[in-house]
Image (tube, rainbow, N blue to C red):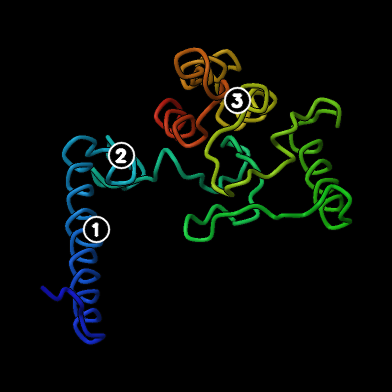
Amino acid sequence: MNFSLSFSQQFFIGMRFCLLMLILCGIVYSAGITKLGELLFPYQAQGSLLDDQNTTRGLEQGQARGSVLVAQNFSGDGYFHGRPSAANNDPTATGGSNLAPSNPALRERALADSSAIQTREQITAAQIPVDLISASGSGVDPHISPAAAQVQIARVARARGISEAEVAKLIANNTEQKQWGIFGQVRVNVLLLNLELDQLAPR
């Protein structure tokens, strides 16, 4: 019995196999995993979005305010500020600045940020937590350290007309611990903190 195949026969067998794998792996598997993720983890699969739970500031109930996984740009004395971002907190353009510590542009930016923070928070350079100066690798890190939140308490309390103790309590309520006590860092989600701040003392 002759099992030898011609080149054309081998070619079409290979093409059929490639097409089959494309359908199975590229379409069936991807669609199945996506649907399974939506069924098992609907909140995460939809982007971990936060909905506005009240109608303050003209927002309709249920309107998305952002994602707990993506930072937003907050400015003004009445809000907590997040980390610097080389991507301007754009989730479609994530990434760090990739500037070496010896790069003059990085040093210039860090010095400018340090000067601005010293003026804004009325503290010295030595009191500035490093995460308020250093940009995150992703460019969309929504968290800051508890220390970075605490140096902003006095400013936020003055701007909102509330006590520093009330602001400190909000920070404590929004401080996330290490997962299982091992993974990650103790951190504060800036968006969650500012949303609660708006509910406590609307501007």
Asked where in the image residue 82 lies, by quadrant, the reply is top right
For the residue marked with disc 1, what is the amino acid? Cys
Which numbered disc, 2 or 3, marks the residue that appears first in the sequence? 2
Residue type, numbered disc 2: Gln
Q: Disc 1 vs disc 3: which is toward the camera?
A: 1
Asked whether 13 or 55 is in front, the reply is 13
Mark 2 sits on what residue? 44
Q: Position of residue 203 (x, y in %)?
A: 48, 37
Q: Nearer the viewer, residue 9 or 31?
A: 9
Residue 25: numbered disc: 1
Q: Earlier in the sequence, mark 1 or mark 3?
A: 1
Secondary structure beneath label 2: helix
Nearer the observer: mark 2 or 3; the answer is 2
View extreme (front): residue: 1
Q: Give percent across and percent down for residue 141.
A: 55, 41
Which numbered circle lies on residue 157? 3
Q: CA distance from mark 1 to mark 3?
A: 54 Å
Q: Dot 1: what SS?
A: helix
User: How far from the left and from the top, in percent, is residue 133?
Assistant: 74, 40
Could you tell whether 100 is left or right of 83 in the image?
right
Circle 3: element type: helix
Question: For the image shown, how many numbered marks are present on the structure?
Answer: 3
Whether residue 82 sits left or right of residue 183 in the image: it is: right
> What x and y, as percent, mark residue 92?
47, 60
118 sits left or right of 140 in the view: right
Vertical relation: 31 (above or below) 80: below
Mark 1 Cα within 10 Å, few/some/many (few <14, many 20+)? Answer: few
Quarter of the rendering occupied by the N terminus: bottom left
- Distance of mark 2 from mark 1, alpha carbons? 23 Å
